[in-house]
Amino acid sequence: MNFLKHNVFLLLLLVSVSSYADDGYRLWLKYDRIADAAKRETYARSAQFIALNGSSLILKTAAEELQAGLQGLLGKPIPIIASAGNQTGGILLTVNKAANPDVQRLNDEGYQITNRSNIAIAGKTDAGVLYGVFALLRQLQTAQPINGLSITSSPKIQYRLLNHWDNTNGTIERGYAGESLWKWIELPETIDPRYRDYARANASLGINGTVINNVNASARFLTAEYLEKVAALANVFRSYGIRLYLSVYFPAPKTIGGLKTADPLDPDVKKWWTDKVKEIYKVIPDFGGFLVKANSEGEPGPQDYGRDHADGANMLAEALAPYDGIVMWRAFVYKADPKADRFKAAYEEFKHLDGKFNRKVIVQVKNGPIDFQPREPFSPLFGNMPKTPLAMEFQITQEYMGHSTNWVYEAPLFKECLDSDTYVSRKGSTVANVVDGSLHNYPLTAIAGVANTGADRNWTGHPMAQANWYAFGRLAWDHTLSSEAIAREWINMTLTQEPKAVKTITDLMLRSREIYVNYNTPIGLSRPWTGAHFAPEPWQNQSSRPDWTAIYYHRADSIGLGFDRTASGSNALEQYRPEVRRVWENAETCPLPYLLWFHHVPWTKKLSTGRTLWDELCTRFYTGADSVGWMQQQWAQVKPAVDPQLFADVAGRLQTQHKEAIWWRDSWLLYFQPFARQPIPSPFKKPERTLEDVKRLSDIYRLR
C-alpha cells in the first residue's frame, strides 16, 4: 500500500514536535519518546508493524496517526503493511462488521482493543477504528499496561459537536485566544495546516462534528462564495470523521435570496431553502446540517411572522429530508419583559411544543436556565420534553469565568449538571440520562460545547484552558467519567508524569472552579450583566432592557439579597418536578450553592454554616480571593516538573487572577455593605479602596 503521498504530513509533524515542543501547540497529542527504556521496549514488542485491512480515507488517517504516534513514543520507525499474514507482535486495524460478536455489541462509532498475539483495534465502522487508535495511543502516553489489554468503548451520545462563534471578519464572539482559526480571505485556495491539527485534536476525543460560524449568523455563509470556502474546511475534516455544520441566519431568503418574506410557511421560502440545501450538498456531500438561533436577543425568526419555533425548525428539516442532516434549534430565547423572570423563558417557549417537531430536529438547551453562569441549577427543560430530543449545550470558552486570565477547570461544572437528578420518572433520572436518550428513548442524541479555540499558538489563550476542551470531549463520549480521572489523564498527556506534581496539579484543577465561584458569585448569586461579561459592576442599572442590568439578578435591598423564585415570587420552581422543588423551595433545605438563585434572603438570617448571610458572603468572597494565593503557592511547587515556558505563563496569569479576584471581592462587598448595614467581620480586613475606586476601575476596563 502506497503511503508516500502522506510522508509530507509525517515530516511536518516531526518538525513541529522538535521545533515547538513546549509552546502548547501539540495540546494533549504529545508523542515524545518514552523515557523509561524498559516500558518503551515492552510497548515496542507489541508494535513492530501496523497492518491495515482496508483503504478508506478515515482508515488511512487512523494508520497514519498510529504510525506517527508510535514513532514518536518509541523512537523508531514503524512500517504500515497491507496484511499481517502469520506475523505477530504488531497492531491490526480492522473494520469488522460481522465476524466478531463482541464488536457487534458496539454502536457504529465504538471500538474494541485486545492484545493477544497481536494488538487488534476493531470497530463496526472506520470511524470506530480511528477512535480506537487514539485510545491506544492514550494508553501508551499515560504509561498504562498493554499486556492482556481488553478495552471496549462506545460513545453514549450520537452527535458530539463543537460550536464556534466565529465571524467572517475573523473575530470570535466570546473568544479569548486570538482571532478565528478560519482564514476566510485565504480560503479555499490556501489550506492552513492548522485545520488538520484541529481535526486531529477533536478526533482524538471522539468529537465528530463542528459548527464553524457564530450563532448570531451572517447570511454570507450561505452564498456560493462562502460555501466554496466552507467546503474546503469540510474536505480537511472528513478524513478525521468530522462533519461540518453551519449556523444560519433565519431571514436569509430575504437578505440574499431576494424574497419579500422569510415566513417559514410561505411556499417560496420553503423552495428557497430546499434549493439552498441541494446546493450545499453538491459541494459538501456529508454536510451535517444547521444550527439556528432565532427570536433571541434581537435575532429574527419565525415569530416575526406569527409562527412558532416548531414551524421554523420543521421547515428547515423538510428541506434536509432527502439528506443525512439535522436541525439543532437553540432554546436560548427570552423577551425583554420587566415583569417576567428570564429563568422561566425557555420552558415557557418550548414545553408546549413537545411532540410537534420534525424527526430531524433536536432542541439545543443550555445547561442552565440563564446564560452559562459559573454555577446554575440545571435547565427545567431537561426531563420535560419526552417527545423531543434535547441536546446539551455547554460553554467551554470562559465567557463568565475569567476569560483568559482565570484558571477554571470546567469538568466539575459539566458533571454537576449531567449528574443532577430530574426525578422525571424515578430517583436517578439524571440530566445525562435525558441527553443520552436512555430516559425517553430519543432517536437522536447530541451534546455541544461552545469552543474556546483561537489563533493563539497554544489554541486556548490560557494554557490550562486546554483541559476544558479535553474534558468536554471526553465527557461527550462517556459522561460517567469523573472530573478527577479526566484531569489526571490530561495532566499526564500534556504537562508532566511526575507523581507528586500530577497530584498537586490535579488538586488545583479540582478546586479551581469552586474557588472562582467563591470570589465571583457565591451562594447562588447570579452574574452582574456587563457588555464584556467580565468587569464586576453590581451597581449597573442602565440598559435597553431590564434583564441586561446587574440589579435585575441580585435584587439587593435593605432587607436582603437574592431572586425569589418560589410561589411568593416568580414561581419559576414550578417548572421542576415536585421532588426537586420540595428541596429548593424551602430556604432551610435549599443547598447553599443555589440559595440566592431561589430565595431573597435577609442579611441577618443565620445559615446552615452558623453565619449570617452577610458574614457568609464576606467569608466566601475573602476566602475565594485568598485561595488564588494558595493556587500560586501550589503551582510554584511543580516548577521543576513542568516546562519552564508554560510554568512562567501560568504563574503570570495566576498573579493577574489574584488581582482580579480581589477586584471582584471588593466590588461586590462595597456595593452590598450600605444595604446590609453590617461591618466586615473579623478576621477579614476592610477593603483598602472605596466603592468609587472600584467603579472607576470597571469604567477603565470597559474602555479597553
Image (cartoon, helix red, strand yellow):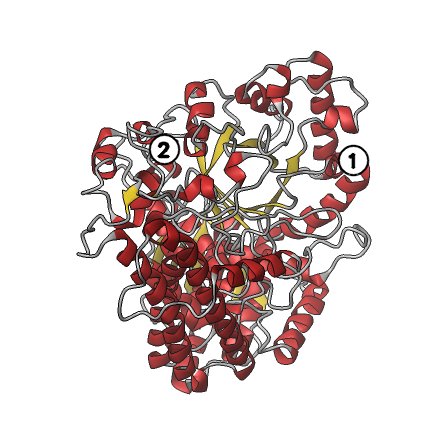
Identify the residue under disc 1: 223
Spatial CA distance of label 2 from label 1 is 38 Å
Which sits in the foreground, 433 or 137?
Answer: 433
In the picture, measured across the screen, residue 139 lies left or right of residue 272, that is: left
Q: Could you say which quadrant of the image residue 590 lies in?
A: top left
Measured as percent of width and height from the top left, residue 296 is found at 57, 31
Q: Is residue 146 among what the camera can see?
A: no
Label 1: how many Cα within 10 Å (few below 14, some 14–19, many 20+) = some
Image quadrant occupied by the N terminus:
bottom right
In the picture, measured across the screen, residue 390 lies left or right of residue 485, that is: right
Which sits in the foreground, 207 or 640?
Answer: 640
Q: Which residue appears at 75% of the width and 57% of the height?
A: 191
Identify the residue under disc 2: 380
Q: Which amino acid does label 2 sit on?
A: Pro
Q: What residue type is labelled 1?
A: Thr
Task: Name the secondary structure under disc 1.
Answer: loop
